[in-house]
Image (tube, rainbow, N blue to C red):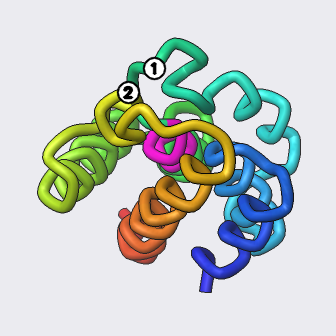
Amino acid sequence: MLKDIALKYFKNGYSCSESIIQACADEGICSPDLLPCATTFSGGMSSGCICGAVSAAQMVLGYNFGRNNRFNNNVFAREKAAQLVERFVKLNRVTCCKVLSSGLEGSARKEHCSKFVSEACDILEDLIKVKV
């Protein structure tokens, strides 16, 4: 499962966003070229805002369903993106990294945030299955 691969990367030094992108690249769901982009998405876009796991999943949805790809359907891509956020919020109430991470740092934060990496992967896997 995607989440197992992502959690392996997450526990071995990758950030939340990097771990999801690398797992997706390993599974052929996105290009490994997205990995450098994901680096600045962790820590709430490096500012505590939207969760890096959510933003990485958004990148993968855009890669698969967005403009100038095989589907070229930005409306469908945005619908998928909205579904991702809606489902994540249903589980966690918010997408804000500062709130989700509960002020934790270091290994405690890493352990706490594993849940969000896992959930984002589960939602992403479900959304990516359904094609146009």
Q: Which quadrant: the N terminus?
A: bottom right
In this rendering, the answer to whether 115 lies above or below 70 is below
Q: Which quadrant: the C terminus?
A: bottom left
Tell me what residue is drawn at x 44 percent, y 44 percent. 54
Q: Identify the residue under disc 1.
A: 48
Q: Position of residue 77 (x, y in %)?
A: 37, 43
Q: How many marks?
A: 2
Q: Is residue 106 magenta?
A: no
Tell me what residue is drawn at x 31 percent, y 46 percent. 76
Q: Position of residue 9 (x, y in %)?
A: 79, 63
Q: Is residue 21 left or right of residue 64?
A: right
Is residue 71 visible in the rendered image? The answer is no
Tell me what residue is drawn at x 74 percent, y 65 percent. 23
Q: Position of residue 93 (x, y in %)?
A: 14, 46
Is residue 79 visible in the rendered image? The answer is yes
Q: Quadrant of residue 39?
A: top right
Tell me what residue is drawn at x 70 percent, y 63 percent. 24
Instruction: Give the magenta part as a residue range.
Output: 52-58
